[in-house]
Amino acid sequence: MQDENYMPEKAGEEKEIDLMELAMKLWSQRKRIVKWCACGAVLGLVVAFSIPKEYTSSVKLAPEVTDGKAGGGGLSALASMAGFSTGSSSADAVYPQLYPDVVGSIPFLTGLFDVKVETKKDHDVFTVQQYLEKETRSPWWSVILSLPGKLLGLLRSSDSVDENHKLDNFQLTTDESRLVEKLSNLVTASVDQKTSVVTIAVTMQDPLVSAILADTVVARLQEYVTDYRTNKARNDLQYAELLNDEARANYYEAQQRYAGYLDHNQGIALRSAQTEQERLENEASLAFSLYNQTAQQVQKARAKVQETTPVYAIISPATVPLKPVKPRKVMILIGFVFLAFVASSAWILFGEPLMEEYKEKAKQMNTKPEEEK
């Protein structure tokens, strides 16, 4: 029993002695570790200052959500007072949780290519496509890493670029596909699952460009959702207005025929003339009734369009950011210093002993043939 209690103590002492030896070994090489950390700090500063600054402008909005159960509220009450009902609103298929998919879709992103933006420094005006292709900078190592791909692209692309090329969302070119992918990383949308608040964030290397594009993305998203939700109502309104125009024209014609008959047949007491007069009067009355009904349908359709038009509450509008969000130079510096410390410690504790052991084995292998000789 004494032997069993003694062994863990001994193993614990050996382990503690080993850790102390490692710590003492690192302490003895502290100047070397400091040099490695200094080199890591210099490399971290080079990397941090090589990464272009990026600014993020975000917008928060709370969209109106329909549950498909409630009616038109106040508009329904007004419509019922006018003598007709607007009916119940249908469920909305494009709910806030789908807004990120809408913003990240190819048609939505390609629709931003022609948006005009202005830089803050020089006040130059570019389209988003021109700005991303010509005005954005990349770190120096990305240029070096992309050279093989560009050379392969030059070797493979033998066809000349068509100057009359038009954007086709069904079949994008290689450059357009890369631009869409780049823009999808810069323009993002997120939704709070609890409050359904939508956050649109745009990251660009120019603060004014990011704010302008963020405001444009919000406007385009509102337009997209509004067009979707009011599409059927607007089509119904257009059809109701067409019927109303036809009914009005028929009513005016019937009224003119009735008035013309009265002008040409005044004072005639014939029964046939009275019958014709009654017929024309009835036609004018029927035409007016149809015209009145279609006019009510137009008012109903207009109320329906207004009812289905979504309302957005802008909680936080787009503003020009003052501070860049990238790069985080302090974190990059700390990270490189930490990596340098870990690398130097690993080399001192494990790398050098392995190298010495390898050299000793190599010497032994070289001395054995000489002894045999």
Image: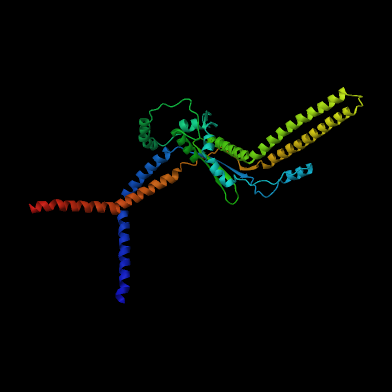
Counting from the top left corner in percent of width and height, residue 297 is at 74, 38
Q: Quadrant of the N terminus?
A: bottom left
Say above or below: 12 vs 267. below
Q: Seen in the image, is 141 located left or right of residue 87? A: left
* Residue 41 point in image, percent of width and height: 38, 44
Taking depth in this image into account, of 21 and 53 the one nearest to the observer is 53
**Residue extending furthest toward the top:** 264
Q: Is residue 53 visible?
A: no
Tell me if I can see residue 15 in this picture: yes
Given residues 99 and 43, the one toward you in this image is 99
Q: Residue furthest bottom?
A: 1
- Residue 345 appears left or right of 358: right
Total tally of numbered discs in the picture? 0
Specify how the rendered protein is coloured.
rainbow
Q: Measured from the top left, where is residue 188 in percent x and y?
A: 52, 42
Question: Looking at the picture, how far across and down is residue 229, in whole percent?
Answer: 63, 41
Q: Relative to the observer, which residue lies in front, 256 or 97?
A: 256
Of the pair 251 and 218, the residue shown nearer to us: 251
- The relative height of residue 17 versus residue 72 in the rendered view (above or below) is below
Q: Is residue 179 left or right of residue 41?
A: right
User: On the rendered structure, is 87 left or right of 94?
Assistant: right
The structure residue drawn at horizontal position 80% and vertical position 34%, both measured from the top left corner, is 286
Snapshot quadrant of residue 116: top right
Q: Residue at x 32, y 73 (%)?
A: 5
The image quadrant that residue 271 belongs to is top right
